[in-house]
Image (cartoon, grey):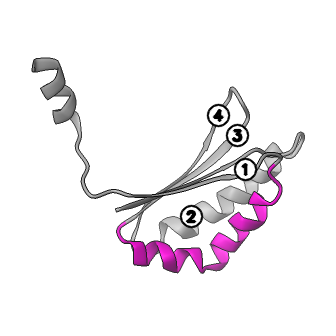
């Protein structure tokens, strides 16, 4: 699995506009083959906006990076008042509640 995140700091007075534009990208991204999840998150403390995506494979993510939808995200990244933070994480395994249970009972 691949997790991709982009953190944007919208210019003053343009937060709503940036969020509205990102919302138009979320639905089409979620519908793409290989997309596990796509979310737009806001940090109420510092005003940043994070686009978080999860992909089944690197190939599916690469296909998305070449798409028109991702081009829209790149354009929005250009409006960020701070350099956008971009991360791609390759996840070999994932666990859930069993990790908490093992830690609490161990």
Q: Taking 63 as reference, is 21 above or below it? A: above
Picture layout, residue 60 above or below residue 27: below
Q: Quadrant of residue 1?
A: bottom left
Q: Which residue is mark 1?
A: 19
**In percent of the image, x 66 and y 78: which residue is there?**
68
Question: On the rendered structure, is 9 left or right of 58?
Answer: right
Q: Which mark is residue 103?
A: none
Sooner in the amino-acid sequence: mark 4 or mark 3: 4
Question: What residue would you read off at disc 3?
Answer: 48
Tell me which label, 3 or 2, sits earlier in the chain.
2
Tell me, yes or no, whether the highlighted magenta stretch contains residue 44.
Answer: no
Magenta-drawn segment: 56-80
- Residue extending farthest to the right is 13
Residue 102 in the image, given as x and y percentages of width and height: 13, 27
Residue at (64% x, 64% y) in the render: 25
Confirm or deny contact between disc 1 and disc 2 (CB under 8 A): no
The answer to which of marks 1 and 2 sits earlier in the sequence is 1
CA gap, disc 3 to disc 2?
21 Å
* Residue 69 sits in quarter: bottom right
- Mark 2 crowd level (few <14, some 14–19, many ≥20, 10 Å Cα): few
Task: From the image, tell me which residue sits under label 2.
Answer: 27
> For the point 50% across and 76% down, which residue is it?
62
Give the side of residue 82 with respect to residue 29, left or right.
right
C-alpha separation, residue under disc 2 versus residue under disc 4? 21 Å
Q: CA distance from mark 1 to mark 3?
A: 11 Å
Tag 4 and tag 1, C-beta contact below 8 Å: no
Residue visible at 80% across and 60% down in the picture: 78
């Amino acid at each position: 699995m691949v997790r991709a995140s982009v953190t944007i700091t919208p210019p003053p007075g343009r937060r709503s506009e940036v969020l509205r534009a990102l919302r138009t990208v979320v639905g089409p991204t979620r519908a793409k083959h290989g997309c596990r999840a796509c979310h737009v998150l806001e940090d109420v403390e510092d005003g940043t906006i994070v686009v978080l995506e999860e992909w089944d494979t690197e190939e599916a993510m690469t296909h998305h990076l070449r798409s028109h939808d991702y081009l829209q995200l790149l354009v929005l990244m250009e409006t960020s008042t701070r350099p956008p933070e971009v991360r791609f994480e390759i996840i070999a395994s994932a666990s859930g509640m069993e990790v908490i249970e093992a830690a609490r009972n161990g």
